[in-house]
Image: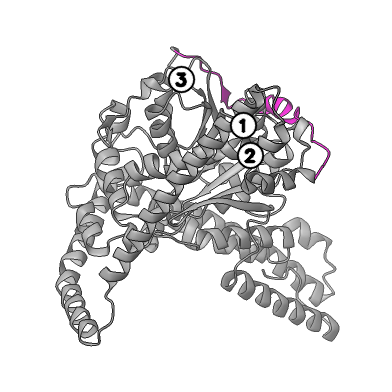
Amino acid sequence: MVSSQVPLTPAELQSELQQIEENSRTLLRVTTSRALVAQTPKQVIWTLNKTRLYRYIPVVPAEQRHKVPLLLVFALMNKPYILDLRPGNSFIEYMVKQGYDVYLLDWGVPGLEDKDLKFDDYVLDYLTRVIRKVKVVSGSQEFSMLGWCIGAILTTIYAALRPDDGLKNLLLLTAPLDFTDKKAGGFVRWVNDKSFDPGKIVSAFGNVPGEMIDYGAKALKPVENYIGSYLTLWDNLDNPRIVESWHAMNTWVTDLIPMAGATYLQLIKELYQENRLIQGKMVIRGERVDLSRIHANLLNVIALGDHISPPCQSESIMTKVSSQDQFLLKVKGGHIGMMAGSGALKFTWPHIDSWLAERSE
Amino acid sequence: MSDQLETTDPRDPFETMNTLWEANLKNWKSMRDTSLESWSKMMIDMVNSDEYSQATGQWLDTYLTMSQPMKRIIDMTMTQVLTGLNMPMRSDVTSLAERLTNIEMRMDDQDAKLDDILHTMQALSSSNHTADVSTVTPTRPNNVAHASGETHAVKIKSKNTGASSTSQTDAVQHKPKGEH
């Protein structure tokens, strides 16, 4: 932040110095402290190992609420509070106000004892139990499930393995499912290079460090992530709305968690390299994941500017499932911005709500 | 910039200086943003190249290969030291954590069975019209706690927002099955 006026009088100079001091303090605060995030009132209703299931306190009277509960499943390598970033910019807060009974699955931070956890375990041991609990607490045998990023892989696998378990609506956000195009995006290129050995990473670290995953994500757009983001902050230091929004997002971006080694190995080898899921060749504890068994109503949301899961990785699921009611929604924005950016409240969230509302009665 | 200079009183050096400063700042920001944009495009092209993939893969491979012997030595030394001090090793702690998770899973299985039993009992009691329902209907504290949240009554928001915003974007495509 540079003043557009040269101070001419002692009073102006003093005011300018005060402004500089205040900006420096703001800069230091937002780059070194954690913002208040995840403030929508909730209660823990179930735990297993590091995993927690939250139920958000409804704010709409029971008789006006949608009958089908909504379970949110986020990725494994980031904290799920991106869905409840801060008041006024929270998808969860929005959906609770729209009358949904919202549940959030927090996978927690895997320890070294969790390094052998695979998709098999996350889907069949954890997700299955979570869904059982959602049904018991909500009193509904039907439920909607929203999966974002790796969470979309998990929910897709579940929907294919347990199609008659009451899943009424399946919502996929930026789902990396189809890796046919080996040139689509940096990740696919990097992990398909013959010198890249995921087994070596896992045997060296056990769990893949959060810093390594973070570097991978940031390196896809290095200038924006390492320089552009800070310049945006610098240019807007006198705008509290932008500063606080930046602070909350920075808190989430720097809140890194590792990924269970066996899951990482499975993700890279079976999905990114061998593309088994979309080809119907993926096997989860002896059961083949057949996407044509999915018959739940499907909303597939794709971010047009997604550089982490390019649109081509998410689109083809529409032709693989048996769902009679399916909708492909393309929105502007990136992998995260689509749901947590300034435009989400205007475009993405109302679309999700309007689609889900008429299918939640 | 020339327009701005025209409005400046040429006899006031401070005002001229301010105008120049402002114009220079704008130009500098514009230049900065333009150069960052082109730099960004160049870097994105670079990280999406096969050469970058090869270089990263090779660097990572070298790092992991080189660091492994040292890691093994540290692990062995730590194991010996902890054993000598009669203290638990990492493997002891992780195996304990694994056992705890197994116990938690067994407890969750029991919880599921209990829910099934309660559900069956509730169904039975509700089907028995002659029985005194209030004395036989089982409840669980867990479900009572959730009902407490339902007292927070807030006016429901209009659900028409989605429909109106749909018309604001042409990026929405409805693709019925079979049209892909």
Kindly check if marks 2 and 1 are in contact, taking CB atoms under 8 A apart as contact.
Answer: yes
Amino acid carrying mark 3 in the image: His
Quarter of the figure with residue B85:
bottom left
User: What residue does disc 3 label?
Assistant: A295
Provide the chain ID for the residue under circle 2.
Answer: B
User: What residue does disc 2 label?
Assistant: B138
Disc 1 packing (10 Å; few <14; some 14–19; many ≥20): some
Kindly check if marks 2 and 3 are in contact, taking CB atoms under 8 A apart as contact.
Answer: no
Residue toward you, B85 or B75? B85
Disc 3 packing (10 Å; few <14; some 14–19; many ≥20): many
Give how far apart the Cα atoms at labels 2 and 3 are. Answer: 35 Å
Residue toward you, A89 or B86? B86
| The residue stretch that appears in magenta | B152-177
Left or right: where B163 falls relative to A28: right
Note whether A254 is above or below A83 in the view shown: below
Q: Residue at x 27, y 70 (%)?
A: B92
Q: Position of residue A79 (x, y in %)?
A: 51, 55
Quarter of the figure with residue A277:
top left
Left or right: where A177 falls relative to A83: left
> If the image is split into quadrants, where does the N terminus of chain B sit?
bottom right
Give how far apart the Cα atoms at labels 3 and 1 are. Answer: 31 Å
Kindly check if marks 3 and 1 are in contact, taking CB atoms under 8 A apart as contact.
Answer: no
Q: Position of residue A249 (x, y in %)?
A: 58, 57
Residue toward you, B118 or A19? B118
User: What residue does disc 1 label?
Assistant: B122
Applied colour scheme = one colour
User: Magenta segment, principal secondary structure?
Assistant: loop
